[in-house]
Amino acid sequence: MSVTIKDVARYCEVSTATVSRVINNDPRISEKTKEKVMKGIKELNYRINGVARSLKTNRTRTIGFICPEIPNDFFMSIAKGVEDELKKYGYSVIICNSNENTEEEKERIKLLCEKCVDGIIIIPATDEGRHFKYLKDANMPVVLVDRLVEDFQSDAVLVDNINGSYCAVEYLINKGYNRIGFIGGDVKLTSAKERFEGYTRALNDYCIPLEKDIIKFGDFHIKGGFDLMKEMMQQDNPPPLVFISNYFMHVGAVKYLIENKYKLDKEVLIASFDDMELSSIFGFSVLRVRQPMMEIGSKAAQLLLSRIDGDKTAYPRIVRLKTELITEW
Amino acid sequence: MSVTIKDVARYCEVSTATVSRVINNDPRISEKTKEKVMKGIKELNYRINGVARSLKTNRTRTIGFICPEIPNDFFMSIAKGVEDELKKYGYSVIICNSNENTEEEKERIKLLCEKCVDGIIIIPATDEGRHFKYLKDANMPVVLVDRLVEDFQSDAVLVDNINGSYCAVEYLINKGYNRIGFIGGDVKLTSAKERFEGYTRALNDYCIPLEKDIIKFGDFHIKGGFDLMKEMMQQDNPPPLVFISNYFMHVGAVKYLIENKYKLDKEVLIASFDDMELSSIFGFSVLRVRQPMMEIGSKAAQLLLSRIDGDKTAYPRIVRLKTELITEW
DNA sequence: TTGAAAGCGCTAACAA
DNA sequence: TTGTTAGCGCTTTCAA
């Protein structure tokens, strides 16, 4: 079949250990032997077999990344952050799709464990976390991202959702708005719950009563945003400004407005959580809460790596990253 | 360390071969032994070590996917197609980012080979393909997607770019437009070149002379679209309709129009290659050429799998998928 | 239907 | 500085 370390050893008239030392840059080797072996490697066209190496070293230098959806700029920006950070250390990333489904998530976890990844980063599909016990049993390092789950304590990277939406709403109030609609995601998700909390806290702190009719919940998707914006605007006295708690709902809301010929000027304004590349071109958006997506990813990667390298610091370690207010006002 | 097949064998008082047969669903095994072993597996909490298995079987059931950018709905929709198809067969996907850079692409290829993936799907970073020779030497199955490269023959999945843009432009001509601007990508890329060719052919066939001033090339990115749309609109006699040859340039063009307060009605219209979820909400878009992204991915996966399974059909096998015209006119 | 044993390609402990 | 060798956890051939 293919060329092995043994072939190289024979060809160069050295031992396999010597060849191994050369390919691992072991310093205890003479310049001369090293050159000879390198030459042999080249001439025989030898390639390292990472599988054999992993079997021996108990390390695959591969980690898993499970997220609810693949073509999704939010999740993939985090994935990029993970990848960029990990590749510095020679790691690669198996990206898996849970399809927002706990069962599939469970499947993927099993598969990744079987593949002996060194650790897993998960953006949970739901708030259900019982199946994560499998990871603990397998002694697999994990970092949760964006959301926490029930029944499972784990290292995690989150953003300061409450403060992010608090500040956004506060900013709007200071701009003179006191009827601010709210469109949010399923409050079972950490992020959705906290963002709603930031909204209510700000209103409370400024003595503005909550208006039930202009507060709406759905899922975090485009369709959810579309449907809720429709409800919002079709009622008798729609608010002049709506705070929307993620990017995809924002997109859905804009979709509704465009399809229904709302003007790009001041008929209705949108503030929202998330600031993606396209957010600013949607035209209704006046204020956004930016999450540092790449940083979320790189931070998660760092946490995971430290656990892989044996860091036993008290569990769970939760990192909360700051958000940033973006406005053209 | 962890529980191995040996532990299970000892615990169940059978041989390791028997345990192996059980976990591989080998039929030549009695119901009774099978049950006994299953019980042992459960009680000891045994987990398969895929690395050891891979070393023995020479198969990792993992494939690599290299693309120029990760947070990119076009590439990731293809990736999802790949993933969905492959997971049926127990495969998983390592997603790598070439950053549109030949050097990084080369690095990733090496890494994937070292990890002994069973095959690689690549959306090439550029038209440069010399470094792909490494794959041939390593005997690694490859499928190229979306673009071909120089100096390297390979299985590939592409769409019918020429016909796609031909039909779009033809449709516009039949709607009465005879001044159609063109904004395209770097013609070194297969897709960019072919889409321009479709445009010119259609104009030729309908005896409309090419107008140099309203034909512009840049890169396939948002900024490219923005800059070229600016050039397009700032000249003396801008065309009433522009054909833009990919999604991201389309986004950039819209960005320019919005920022410069173009009205959402008929001041200027856009037709474009690609039909993404957001395309229809941009407001200027009247016609789009839809690529079947998921299908591109699943087809690429199928091609790759067949090569992995030893299919020696004449190389290269090129699959051209059809596009579809989307319009609300 | 089951078991014994070789060996996949590599690393690392130990010896020289 | 280099070599010998055991063995990582599994599959698979051959024999029983």
Image (cartoon, coloured by chain):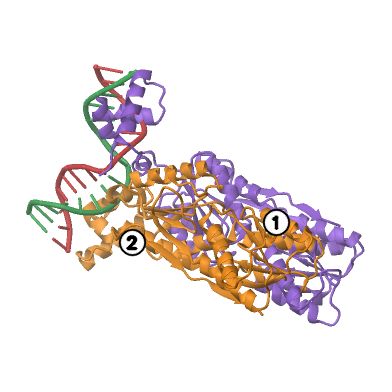
Chain colours: A orange, B purple, C green, D red
Residue located beneath label 2 in the image: A306
| Secondary structure type for disc 2 | helix
Q: Give the image location of residue B44, x and y in percent.
A: 29, 34
Instruction: Report the front residue among B327 and B124.
Output: B327
Residue A176 seen in this snapshot: yes
Instruction: Report the front residue among A111 and A281.
Output: A281
Query: Disc 2 marks which amino acid?
Result: Ser
Q: Quadrant of residue B329?
A: bottom right
Instruction: Report the front residue among A299 and A79.
Output: A299
- Vertical side of A33 occupied by A105: above or below: above
A281 to the left or right of B99: right
Residue B68 seen in this snapshot: no
Instruction: Report the front residue among B150 and A101.
Output: A101
Report in which chain the residue with disc 1 lies: A
On the same chain: label 2 and label 1?
yes
Report in which chain the residue with disc 2 lies: A
A191 to the left or right of B56: right
- Vertical side of B259 occupied by A218: above or below: above
Q: Give the image location of residue B249, x and y in percent.
A: 69, 68
Which quarter of the image is occupied by the N terminus of chain B? Answer: top left
Q: Give the image location of residue A46, x and y in percent.
A: 35, 54
Q: Are marks 2 and 1 in contact (CB under 8 Å)?
A: no
Residue visible at 85% across and 82% down in the picture: B236
Q: Quadrant of residue A207?
A: bottom right
| Secondary structure type for disc 1 | helix
Residue visible at 85% across and 59% down in the picture: B170
Residue located beneath label 1 in the image: A228
